[in-house]
Image (spheres, rainbow, N blue to C red):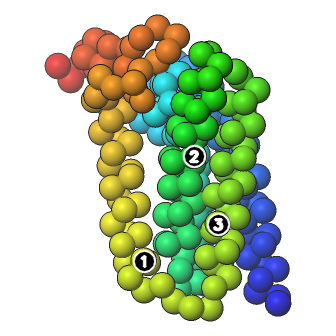
């Protein structure tokens, strides 16, 4: 019972941490003066893909920092499910309601963000409190967490020209002009 209470607090603080940092991260790229390094981890435009970073990197950071406090054989499986939940649900909710309303509604977007973060940590709690060890799922989770991180780094810098990556406010993808940005700020090209 004591360990279950510890897990509950872990997930409660995880929800709070990701909600606060995720909300703040929406503005962090602009506040940083459009810094490339900040843009890799936090949203650089209004696309759904970029908004998913509001949950992904805060969740990763929380789990990495909490790794020493929670001893569970299903830790990485819980982490993976916490990452996957918003990756699936936020686009499903957004594209479902916008297909009916034909417009984005800020209140629904905000509610769906917090709902998805809540569900992510609820699922993490349910997985972490299991006494059964999901060895195969734990093993695959390492691999898929790395894939998610690599995908977000790659597709932030080189987004495909697909609706998920398009900024609906101006039709751009990823950084507004990555080549110009690299030349101007880092003299790389």
**Quadrant location of residue 154?**
top left
Q: Which residue is drawn at 77% across and 83% down?
A: 4
Report if the CB atoms under discs 2 and 3 are less than 8 Å apart: no
Q: Foreground: 156 or 108?
A: 108
Count neighbours of disc 1 (C-alpha within 10 A) and say few if under 14, some if 14 to 19, many if 20 or more: some
Residue that carries the numbered disc 1 in the rendered image? 137
- The answer, for residue 174, to whether it is visible in the render is no
Report if the CB atoms under discs 3 and 1 are less than 8 Å apart: no
Left or right of 79: which side holds 136?
left
Q: Residue at x 67, y 50 (%)?
A: 117
Q: Foreground: 66 or 120?
A: 120
Between disc 2 and disc 1, whose residue precedes?
A: 2
Q: Which residue is drawn at 42% across and 77% down?
A: 137
- Element marked by disc 2: helix
Q: Which residue is drawn at 67% across and 40% down?
A: 113
Q: In x, y percent, where is residue 92?
A: 55, 40
Figure check: 120 above or below 108: below
Report if the CB atoms under discs 2 and 1 are less than 8 Å apart: no
- Element marked by disc 3: helix
Q: How many labels does the image show?
A: 3
**Quadrant location of residue 82?**
bottom right
> Looking at the rendered structure, which numbered label has been put on residue 89?
2
Residue that carries the numbered disc 3 in the rendered image? 123
For the N terminus, the quadrant is bottom right
Figure check: 149 above or below 106: below
Q: Nearer the viewer, mark 2 or mark 1?
A: 2
CA gap, disc 3 and disc 1: 14 Å
CA gap, disc 2 and disc 1: 21 Å
- The answer, for residue 11, to whether it is visible in the render is yes
Q: In x, y percent, where is residue 48?
A: 50, 30
Left or right of 143: which side holds 53?
right
For the C terminus, the quadrant is top left
């Amino acid at each position: 019972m004591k360990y279950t209470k510890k897990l509950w607090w872990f997930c409660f603080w995880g929800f709070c941490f990701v909600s606060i940092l995720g909300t703040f991260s929406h503005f962090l790229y602009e506040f940083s003066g459009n810094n490339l390094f900040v843009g890799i981890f936090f949203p650089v435009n209004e696309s759904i893909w970029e908004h998913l970073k509001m949950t992904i990197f805060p969740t990763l950071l929380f789990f990495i920092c909490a790794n020493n406090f929670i001893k569970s054989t299903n830790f990485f499986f819980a982490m993976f499910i916490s990452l996957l939940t918003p990756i699936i649900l936020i686009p499903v909710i957004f594209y479902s309601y916008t297909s009916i309303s034909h417009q984005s509604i800020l209140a629904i977007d905000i509610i769906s963000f917090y709902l998805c973060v809540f569900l992510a940590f609820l699922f993490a709690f349910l997985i972490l409190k299991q006494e059964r060890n999901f060895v195969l799922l734990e093993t695959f989770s390492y691999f898929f967490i790395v894939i998610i991180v690599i995908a977000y780094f790659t597709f932030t810098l080189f987004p495909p020209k697909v609706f998920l990556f398009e900024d609906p406010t101006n039709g751009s993808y990823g950084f507004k002009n990555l080549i110009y940005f690299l030349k101007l700020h880092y003299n790389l090209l």
